[in-house]
Amino acid sequence: MDVQIDPEWKLVLRDEFRKAYFEQIVLFLKTEKSQGKTIYPPGTLIFNAFNTTPFSHVKVVIIGQDPYHGAGQAMGLSFSVPAGVNPPPSLQNIFKELQADLGIKVPPGFGDLSSWARQGVLLLNAALTVRAGEPFSHANIGWADFTNSVISELSDRKGNLVFLLWGKFAQEKQELIDETKHHVLKAAHPSPFSADKGFFGCRHFSKTNAFLVADGLDPIDWGLQAS
Protein backbone atom coordinates (compact mmCIF):
# COMPACT_ATOMS: atom_id res chain seq x y z
CA MET A 1 0.00 0.00 0.00
CA ASP A 2 1.34 3.41 -1.01
CA VAL A 3 0.35 5.40 2.08
CA GLN A 4 -0.66 8.96 1.22
CA ILE A 5 1.15 10.82 3.96
CA ASP A 6 3.35 13.91 4.22
CA PRO A 7 6.84 13.14 2.79
CA GLU A 8 8.62 14.05 6.05
CA TRP A 9 6.46 11.65 8.04
CA LYS A 10 6.77 8.99 5.34
CA LEU A 11 10.54 9.09 5.80
CA VAL A 12 10.40 9.07 9.61
CA LEU A 13 7.91 6.18 9.68
CA ARG A 14 9.15 4.23 6.66
CA ASP A 15 10.08 1.18 8.75
CA GLU A 16 6.62 1.05 10.32
CA PHE A 17 4.91 0.89 6.93
CA ARG A 18 6.96 -2.20 6.10
CA LYS A 19 6.09 -4.15 9.24
CA ALA A 20 3.65 -7.05 9.32
CA TYR A 21 1.28 -5.35 11.75
CA PHE A 22 0.78 -2.43 9.34
CA GLU A 23 0.03 -4.83 6.51
CA GLN A 24 -2.57 -6.40 8.80
CA ILE A 25 -4.16 -3.00 9.43
CA VAL A 26 -4.47 -2.43 5.69
CA LEU A 27 -5.94 -5.90 5.17
CA PHE A 28 -8.41 -5.41 8.03
CA LEU A 29 -9.65 -2.10 6.63
CA LYS A 30 -9.98 -3.49 3.11
CA THR A 31 -11.95 -6.46 4.47
CA GLU A 32 -14.30 -4.24 6.46
CA LYS A 33 -14.97 -2.09 3.41
CA SER A 34 -15.56 -5.13 1.23
CA GLN A 35 -18.16 -6.24 3.76
CA GLY A 36 -20.01 -2.97 3.33
CA LYS A 37 -19.02 -1.49 6.68
CA THR A 38 -18.62 2.27 7.01
CA ILE A 39 -15.29 3.46 8.38
CA TYR A 40 -14.49 6.91 9.73
CA PRO A 41 -12.76 9.12 8.83
CA PRO A 42 -12.83 8.83 5.02
CA GLY A 43 -9.72 7.26 3.58
CA THR A 44 -8.28 10.57 2.39
CA LEU A 45 -8.38 11.89 5.98
CA ILE A 46 -6.94 8.91 7.88
CA PHE A 47 -3.51 10.60 7.93
CA ASN A 48 -4.85 14.16 8.09
CA ALA A 49 -2.99 14.93 11.34
CA PHE A 50 0.33 14.11 9.67
CA ASN A 51 -0.47 15.92 6.43
CA THR A 52 -1.57 19.08 8.25
CA THR A 53 1.34 19.03 10.72
CA PRO A 54 4.58 17.86 9.05
CA PHE A 55 7.22 16.34 11.33
CA SER A 56 9.46 19.41 11.27
CA HIS A 57 6.53 21.65 12.30
CA VAL A 58 5.45 19.73 15.41
CA LYS A 59 5.67 21.77 18.61
CA VAL A 60 2.73 20.43 20.64
CA VAL A 61 1.09 16.98 20.77
CA ILE A 62 -2.50 16.40 21.94
CA ILE A 63 -3.32 12.69 22.21
CA GLY A 64 -6.87 11.42 21.75
CA GLN A 65 -8.20 7.88 21.83
CA ASP A 66 -10.04 7.14 18.60
CA PRO A 67 -12.01 9.06 15.96
CA TYR A 68 -15.60 10.18 16.43
CA HIS A 69 -17.92 7.40 15.26
CA GLY A 70 -20.85 9.54 14.12
CA ALA A 71 -21.52 10.49 10.51
CA GLY A 72 -19.60 13.55 9.35
CA GLN A 73 -17.68 14.08 12.59
CA ALA A 74 -14.26 12.44 12.20
CA MET A 75 -11.68 14.36 10.18
CA GLY A 76 -8.39 12.75 11.21
CA LEU A 77 -7.55 15.33 13.88
CA SER A 78 -8.09 14.37 17.52
CA PHE A 79 -11.06 16.16 19.14
CA SER A 80 -11.74 18.17 15.96
CA VAL A 81 -14.86 18.18 13.78
CA PRO A 82 -15.29 19.73 10.34
CA ALA A 83 -16.66 23.23 10.01
CA GLY A 84 -20.45 23.17 10.18
CA VAL A 85 -20.55 20.21 12.57
CA ASN A 86 -21.55 20.97 16.15
CA PRO A 87 -18.73 20.32 18.64
CA PRO A 88 -19.24 17.15 20.71
CA PRO A 89 -19.31 17.48 24.53
CA SER A 90 -15.56 16.93 25.10
CA LEU A 91 -14.69 19.59 22.56
CA GLN A 92 -17.20 21.97 24.11
CA ASN A 93 -15.41 21.49 27.43
CA ILE A 94 -12.04 22.15 25.78
CA PHE A 95 -13.47 25.46 24.56
CA LYS A 96 -14.78 26.29 28.04
CA GLU A 97 -11.29 25.84 29.46
CA LEU A 98 -9.79 27.82 26.59
CA GLN A 99 -12.07 30.75 27.40
CA ALA A 100 -11.39 30.49 31.14
CA ASP A 101 -7.64 30.29 30.56
CA LEU A 102 -7.04 32.82 27.79
CA GLY A 103 -10.36 34.60 27.32
CA ILE A 104 -10.74 33.14 23.82
CA LYS A 105 -14.34 32.54 22.84
CA VAL A 106 -14.98 30.08 20.02
CA PRO A 107 -17.86 30.91 17.66
CA PRO A 108 -20.97 28.81 18.41
CA GLY A 109 -21.16 25.61 16.38
CA PHE A 110 -17.51 25.77 15.25
CA GLY A 111 -15.16 22.92 16.09
CA ASP A 112 -12.54 22.71 13.35
CA LEU A 113 -9.09 22.67 14.98
CA SER A 114 -7.17 22.75 11.69
CA SER A 115 -5.72 26.18 12.48
CA TRP A 116 -4.07 24.68 15.57
CA ALA A 117 -2.68 21.82 13.49
CA ARG A 118 -1.22 24.20 10.89
CA GLN A 119 0.71 25.96 13.67
CA GLY A 120 2.40 22.77 14.88
CA VAL A 121 -0.17 21.13 17.16
CA LEU A 122 -0.20 17.43 16.23
CA LEU A 123 -3.76 16.26 16.95
CA LEU A 124 -3.03 12.54 17.22
CA ASN A 125 -5.56 9.82 17.93
CA ALA A 126 -4.17 6.52 19.20
CA ALA A 127 -6.37 4.69 16.68
CA LEU A 128 -6.72 6.34 13.28
CA THR A 129 -9.98 4.68 12.22
CA VAL A 130 -13.27 3.48 13.71
CA ARG A 131 -16.33 1.56 12.50
CA ALA A 132 -19.43 3.73 12.22
CA GLY A 133 -21.45 3.75 15.44
CA GLU A 134 -18.97 1.51 17.29
CA PRO A 135 -16.48 3.39 19.46
CA PHE A 136 -13.10 1.69 19.98
CA SER A 137 -13.96 -0.89 17.29
CA HIS A 138 -10.53 -0.47 15.67
CA ALA A 139 -8.58 0.10 18.87
CA ASN A 140 -6.93 -3.33 18.74
CA ILE A 141 -6.18 -3.81 15.05
CA GLY A 142 -2.59 -2.51 15.27
CA TRP A 143 -3.00 1.25 15.29
CA ALA A 144 -1.59 1.48 18.82
CA ASP A 145 1.71 0.02 17.59
CA PHE A 146 1.82 2.64 14.86
CA THR A 147 0.91 5.68 16.95
CA ASN A 148 3.16 4.58 19.83
CA SER A 149 5.99 4.60 17.29
CA VAL A 150 4.94 8.10 16.24
CA ILE A 151 5.21 9.31 19.84
CA SER A 152 8.55 7.55 20.32
CA GLU A 153 10.00 9.02 17.12
CA LEU A 154 8.90 12.50 18.15
CA SER A 155 10.43 12.02 21.58
CA ASP A 156 13.69 10.64 20.20
CA ARG A 157 14.25 12.96 17.24
CA LYS A 158 12.94 16.28 18.50
CA GLY A 159 13.35 18.47 21.59
CA ASN A 160 11.25 20.90 23.60
CA LEU A 161 7.88 19.47 22.55
CA VAL A 162 4.86 19.99 24.78
CA PHE A 163 2.73 16.86 25.27
CA LEU A 164 -0.81 17.37 26.57
CA LEU A 165 -2.03 14.15 28.17
CA TRP A 166 -5.72 14.38 28.99
CA GLY A 167 -7.16 11.41 30.84
CA LYS A 168 -5.83 8.02 31.90
CA PHE A 169 -5.54 6.62 28.39
CA ALA A 170 -3.34 9.46 27.12
CA GLN A 171 -1.30 9.44 30.32
CA GLU A 172 -0.35 5.81 29.72
CA LYS A 173 1.70 7.15 26.77
CA GLN A 174 3.92 9.11 29.16
CA GLU A 175 6.39 6.22 29.32
CA LEU A 176 7.17 6.80 25.62
CA ILE A 177 8.26 10.40 26.24
CA ASP A 178 11.73 11.47 27.34
CA GLU A 179 10.91 14.09 29.96
CA THR A 180 14.53 15.27 30.10
CA LYS A 181 13.95 16.74 26.61
CA HIS A 182 10.24 17.54 26.55
CA HIS A 183 7.43 19.07 28.62
CA VAL A 184 4.48 16.96 29.77
CA LEU A 185 1.22 18.47 31.02
CA LYS A 186 -1.39 16.11 32.50
CA ALA A 187 -5.04 16.67 33.37
CA ALA A 188 -8.34 14.81 33.53
CA HIS A 189 -10.08 14.08 30.25
CA PRO A 190 -12.39 16.85 28.97
CA SER A 191 -15.29 14.42 28.79
CA PRO A 192 -18.43 15.52 30.70
CA PHE A 193 -17.79 12.54 33.00
CA SER A 194 -14.40 13.83 34.15
CA ALA A 195 -13.82 17.45 33.12
CA ASP A 196 -14.66 18.74 36.60
CA LYS A 197 -12.12 16.35 38.14
CA GLY A 198 -9.09 18.32 36.98
CA PHE A 199 -9.50 19.39 33.37
CA PHE A 200 -11.29 22.59 34.18
CA GLY A 201 -8.70 24.92 35.65
CA CYS A 202 -5.68 23.08 34.20
CA ARG A 203 -4.70 26.15 32.12
CA HIS A 204 -2.85 23.96 29.63
CA PHE A 205 -3.17 26.48 26.81
CA SER A 206 -1.34 29.29 28.60
CA LYS A 207 1.13 26.85 30.14
CA THR A 208 1.93 25.42 26.72
CA ASN A 209 2.66 28.86 25.33
CA ALA A 210 4.82 29.69 28.34
CA PHE A 211 6.95 26.60 27.63
CA LEU A 212 7.22 27.43 23.93
CA VAL A 213 8.25 31.03 24.54
CA ALA A 214 10.79 29.99 27.18
CA ASP A 215 12.29 27.62 24.60
CA GLY A 216 12.52 30.40 22.01
CA LEU A 217 9.57 29.23 19.93
CA ASP A 218 6.50 31.10 18.72
CA PRO A 219 3.42 30.55 20.91
CA ILE A 220 0.28 28.96 19.52
CA ASP A 221 -2.58 31.27 18.55
CA TRP A 222 -5.36 29.20 20.14
CA GLY A 223 -8.09 31.30 18.53
CA LEU A 224 -9.89 29.26 15.88
CA GLN A 225 -10.05 30.35 12.27
CA ALA A 226 -11.92 28.95 9.32
CA SER A 227 -9.76 26.91 6.95
Image (tube, rainbow, N blue to C red):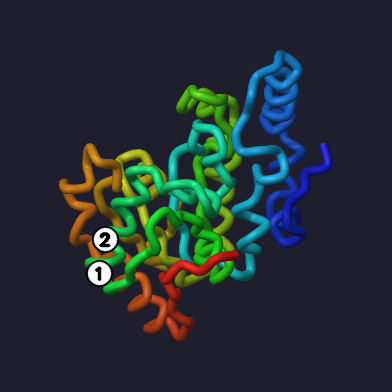
Mark carried by residue 97: 2
Three-letter residue code for mark 1 = Asp
Q: Quadrant of residue 57?
A: bottom right
Q: Judging from the image, what secondary structure is the residue with disc 1 in? A: helix
Q: In which quarter of the image is residue 103?
A: bottom left
> Which residue is more in the foreground, 18 or 92?
92
Measured from the top left, where is residue 188 in percent x and y?
A: 25, 48
Q: In this view, does 17 lie above or below 200?
A: above
> Which residue is more in the foreground, 191 or 89?
89
Q: Judging from the image, what secondary structure is the residue with disc 2 in? A: helix
Q: Please indicate whether residue 197 sits to the left or right of residue 142 in the image.
A: left
Report the residue marked by disc 1.
Answer: 101
Measured from the top left, where is residue 44 in percent x and y?
A: 72, 44
Measured from the top left, where is residue 11 in percent x and y?
A: 75, 56
Measured from the top left, where is residue 2 in percent x and y?
A: 83, 42
- Disc 1 crowd rating (10 Å Cα; few below 14, some 14-19, many 20+) is some
Q: Please indicate whether residue 38 sits to the left or right of residue 134 in the image.
A: right
| Label 2, label 1: how far apart the Cα atoms are | 6 Å
Three-letter residue code for mark 2 = Glu
Q: Please indicate whether residue 59 sits to the left or right of residue 20 in the image.
A: left
* Residue furthest out toward the right: 2
